[in-house]
Amino acid sequence: AQSVAQPEDQVNVAEGNPLTVKCTYSVSGNPYLFWYVQYPNRGLQFLLKYITGDNLVKGSYGFEAEFNKSQTSFHLKKPSALVSDSALYFCAVRDPGYSSASKIIFGSGTRLSIRP
Amino acid sequence: DAGVIQSPRHEVTEMGQEVTLRCKPISGHDYLFWYRQTMMRGLELLIYFNNNVPIDDSGMPEDRFSAKMPNASFSTLKIQPSEPRDSAVYFCASSFATSGTDTQYFGPGTRLTVL
C-alpha cells in the first residue's frame, strides 16, 4: 500500500526566513513524489516532482524538495519566504511498483502562512 | 494549451435537484480524475478514467453520484438527487501517463452549494 503524511496542519514563517513543509511517505518500492500548491479559490498547481536521480529537486517559484530515502521524507523548502507563498501545500506519492494505474495519493495539506 | 476546463465555476441548487459538472481535459491526456474538496475531509479522489474507461470508482460516496466519459475530450460528474452534504469544490484533473511521470494537472474547480 502507499500513503503520505503531512504532520503539520499549519506552518508560520516570517518573510525572508527559510521555510520547510514536511512530508513523509510509505511505499513498497521506489516512489514518485510530488508537491502541489493551492492558492485561494484556485485548483492545485504542480510545483515539482521526484522520479529518480538527484535527491534535490528544484521547482517553480524558487521551491525545492529533498528526497531522503532512509527517512522516507520529501520535505519542501525555500531559502527565503515571500508573503505571496502563503497557500495550501499538498504532498503526493505514487508507488509505480504497486499499481500500473496513474492514481496518486495526496496528503492532507499544510497551510503555509508568511507574515510580513 | 488552455489547461483543464471545468464548468460551471459555481453552482447553487436546491436539495433534490440534479447537478451536472463538466470537464474538458488537456488534449492528449489519457487519464482523467474527479476529486472533491471539503474542509472536513480534505481532497478526496472520487473516480478516475483511463482512455475513457472507468478504472476505480471506489471513492464515489453513494449511488447518487455517477460519472461518464463519452470521449477523450469530455467528462461529466452527475449528482442525482443532490443533498446539502454534497456541497464542496469539485476538481477535475488529467494526466499523460505514457510519459511515465503521472503529473496531474488540475482544473479551476466547480464550487457546488446545495441548499
Image (tube, grey):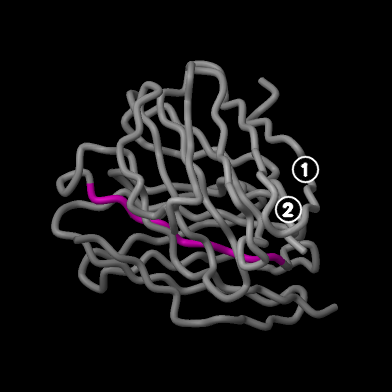
Q: In this view, does A8 lie to the left or right of A39?
A: left
User: In the rendered view of the protein, which quadrant contains the C terminus of chain A?
Assistant: bottom right
- Measured as percent of width and height from the top left, residue A12 is found at 67, 83
* Main secondary structure type of the part rendered in magenta: strand
The residue indicated by pointer 1 is: B9
- Measured as percent of width and height from the top left, residue A26 is found at 24, 66
Q: Are marks 2 and 1 on the same chain?
A: yes
Q: Is residue A69 above or below residue B26?
A: below
Crowdedness of circle 1 by 10 Å Cα count: few (<14), some, many (20+)? some
Q: What's the chain of the residue with tag 2? A: B
Residue at position x 39%, y 32% in the image? B49
Q: Is residue B73 left or right of residue A92?
A: right
The mark nearer the N terminus, 2 or 1, is 1
- Measured as percent of width and height from the top left, residue A18 is found at 62, 74
In the depicted view, which residue is nearer to us: A113 or B98? B98
Q: Distance of mark 2 from mark 1, alpha carbons?
A: 6 Å
The residue indicated by pointer 2 is: B111
Q: What's the chain of the residue with tag 1? A: B
| Helix, strand or loop status at disc 1 | loop
In the depicted view, which residue is nearer to us: A80 or B87? B87
Residue range highlighted in magenta? A87-95
In the depicted view, which residue is nearer to us: B103 or A12? B103
Q: Are marks 2 and 1 in contact (CB under 8 Å)?
A: yes
Specify the amino acid type for callout 2: Arg
- Measured as percent of width and height from the top left, residue A29 is found at 15, 54
In the depicted view, which residue is nearer to us: B17 or A52? B17
Total of numbered circles in the picture?
A: 2
Q: Which mark is residue B93?
A: none
Which quarter of the figure has residue B7?
A: top right
Residue A72 magenta-drawn? no
